[in-house]
Image (cartoon, grey):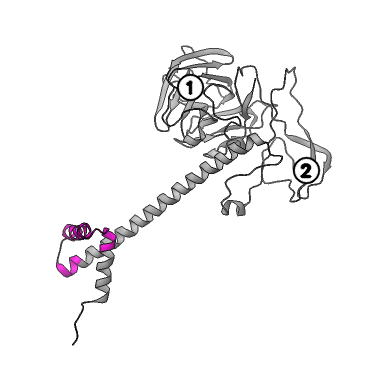
C-alpha cells in the first residue's frame, strides 16, 4: 500500500480558505489527534497540499467525523478535489432528505449535486458522537465506481459519471465550506491507493525535553503538545543547530505495520515575509518529491493574486473613465443645453467616429474647456 497523503491540522490545509480548529477533546480522538478542523466559509473550500506522487483517478480517503449539537441536511463532509481547479470535488455528507443518512455528492464550485444516498441511517446525530468515513473512488470520470463506508460498513455503491467541469483528476483533500452551522469537525485524514478502513493517523507531538537543544529562541517549556499555540515558538537562525525532544506515547493497544511517517513543523511566518510576497516555505531536509507540489501551489497562488490585481486595476480604470465621461457630460449640458442622454450620445458618437475611447474624448473636451475659447491674433 502507498500512502498518497496524510494530515489533520490547520497547517495541512494551506490552500483556499483558512480552516478553523477546535482543540476541545470532544471533537477528535484523544490520543490520536490534537484538534478537529473545518472550513466555515460559505461556498468555498480549504484544500491540502497536492499529493506528492501527483494526481490520481483512483484512491481511498479516510477520516473521522465528530458531531456537535447542530445538524443539517445536504451538508458535505471532506472529499477529494484538484488544487488547480480551486473549489469543487467529490464529497461524502448528509443526505438531502435526512441528516442521519450518508450521501455522496459532487460539487463544481457552484452547484452541489447529490449522486446517491444510503437506505439506512449511519450518520450519528448525538452531540459528541463520531463516525469513521472511508471513500473509495475507482476511475474518476465518466464511468466511475464509488463506495462509501461508515464504521467499515459499506453503505453506498454508486456507478456512473462523477465528471466535474475543470477537474480531470484528483490531487488533494478538500473541505467544503459551510458557514453558520451545522458544524461537524474532522480529523485523521489518510489518502491511499488501497483499502484505508483499518488505518489510523497518530499525531506524535513533542511533549518533553530531549538530550539536546541548541536553538537560541525559546526553551523546552515552550512546548505544549495539547494546546496548539503558535505564539510561543522555539527557533534558530543559524544552520546546523540540533534540537531534540521526546514525543507523545502511542495509544494503548496493539498495532500492525507503520505504512508512513510524516514530519511536519508549524513555521513562524513573519509579517515581513508576507509583505514581501512570499508564497510558501520549504523546510529542510527537503525531499525531491515535495518540491514539485510546493512549486505548483506557489505558482497557482501567484496566478490567483495576479488575476485579482489585474481585475482591481481594470475596475479602477473603468471607474476613472466613468468619472471623466460624467464631467464631460456636465460641460456639454451647461454650455450647449443638452440633456444628459444627449450629452452621452454626443461623446459616444464622437468616440466611434474618431476611433477613440469615450474616456479619451472626454479628456480632450475637459482639456479644451480648461484652456477656454481660442482667439486669433493679427
Q: Is residue 357 above or below residue 245?
A: below
Secondary structure category for the residue under label 1: loop
Which residue: 56% across, 12% down? 153
Which residue: 34% across, 59% down? 320
The numbered mark at residue 140 is: 1
Q: Nearer the viewer, residue 108 or 255?
A: 108
Which residue: 52% across, 26% down? 79
Q: Which residues are magenta?
A: 332-361
Q: Is residue 266 visible?
A: yes
| Residue 54 falls in image quadrant | top right
Q: Quadrant of the C terminus?
A: bottom left
| Residue 187 falls in image quadrant | top right
Q: Earlier in the sequence, mark 1 or mark 2?
A: 1
- Within 10 angstroms of label 1, few (less than 14), some, or many (20 or more) residues? many
Residue 210 x/y as whole percent = 82, 38
Q: Nearer the viewer, residue 181 or 39?
A: 39
Q: CA distance from mark 1 to mark 2?
A: 48 Å
Q: Which residue is mark 2?
A: 221
Amino acid at each position: 500500500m502507498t500512502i498518497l497523503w496524510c494530515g489533520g491540522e490547520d497547517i495541512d490545509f494551506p490552500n483556499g480558505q483558512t480552516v478553523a480548529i477546535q482543540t476541545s477533546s470532544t471533537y477528535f480522538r484523544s490520543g490520536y489527534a490534537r484538534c478537529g478542523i473545518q472550513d466555515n466559509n460559505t461556498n468555498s473550500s480549504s484544500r491540502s497540499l497536492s499529493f506528492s506522487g501527483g494526481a490520481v483517478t483512483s484512491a481511498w480517503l479516510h477520516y473521522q467525523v465528530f458531531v456537535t449539537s447542530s445538524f443539517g441536511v445536504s451538508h458535505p463532509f471532506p472529499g477529494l478535489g484538484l488544487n488547480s481547479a480551486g473549489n469543487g470535488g467529490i464529497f461524502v455528507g448528509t443526505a438531502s432528505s435526512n441528516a442521519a443518512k450518508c450521501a455522496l455528492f459532487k460539487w463544481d464550485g457552484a452547484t452541489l449535486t447529490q449522486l446517491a444516498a444510503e437506505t439506512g441511517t449511519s450518520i450519528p446525530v448525538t452531540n459528541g458522537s463520531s463516525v469513521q468515513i472511508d471513500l473509495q473512488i475507482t476511475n474518476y470520470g465518466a464511468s466511475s465506481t464509488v463506495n462509501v463506508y461508515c464504521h467499515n460498513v459499506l453503505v453506498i455503491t454508486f456507478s456512473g459519471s462523477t465528471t466535474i467541469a475543470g477537474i480531470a483528476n484528483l490531487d488533494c483533500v478538500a473541505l467544503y465550506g459551510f458557514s453558520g452551522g451545522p458544524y461537524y469537525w474532522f480529523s485523521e485524514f489518510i489518502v491511499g491507493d488501497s483499502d484505508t478502513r483499518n488505518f489510523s493517523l497518530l499525531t506524535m507531538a513533542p511533549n518533553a525535553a530531549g538530550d539536546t537543544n541548541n536553538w537560541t529562541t525559546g526553551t523546552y517549556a515552550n512546548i505544549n503538545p495539547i494546546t496548539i499555540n503558535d505564539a510561543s515558538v522555539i527557533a534558530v537562525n543559524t544552520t546546523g543547530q540540533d534540537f531534540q525532544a521526546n514525543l507523545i506515547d502511542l495509544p494503548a493497544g496493539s498495532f500492525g505495520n507503520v505504512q508512513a511517517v510524516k514530519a511536519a513543523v508549524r513555521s513562524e511566518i513573519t509579517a515581513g515575509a508576507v509583505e514581501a510576497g512570499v508564497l510558501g516555505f520549504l523546510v529542510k531536509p527537503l525531499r525531491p518529491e515535495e518540491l514539485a507540489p510546493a512549486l505548483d501551489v506557489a505558482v497557482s497562488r501567484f496566478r490567483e493574486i495576479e488575476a485579482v490585481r489585474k481585475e482591481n486595476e481594470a475596475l479602477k480604470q473603468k471607474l476613472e473613465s466613468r468619472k471623466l465621461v460624467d464631467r464631460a457630460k456636465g460641460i456639454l449640458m451647461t454650455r450647449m443645453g443638452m440633456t444628459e442622454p444627449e450629452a452621452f450620445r454626443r461623446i459616444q458618437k464622437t468616440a466611434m467616429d474618431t476611433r477613440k475611447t469615450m474616456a479619451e474624448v472626454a479628456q480632450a473636451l475637459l482639456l479644451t474647456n480648461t484652456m477656454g475659447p481660442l482667439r486669433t491674433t493679427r
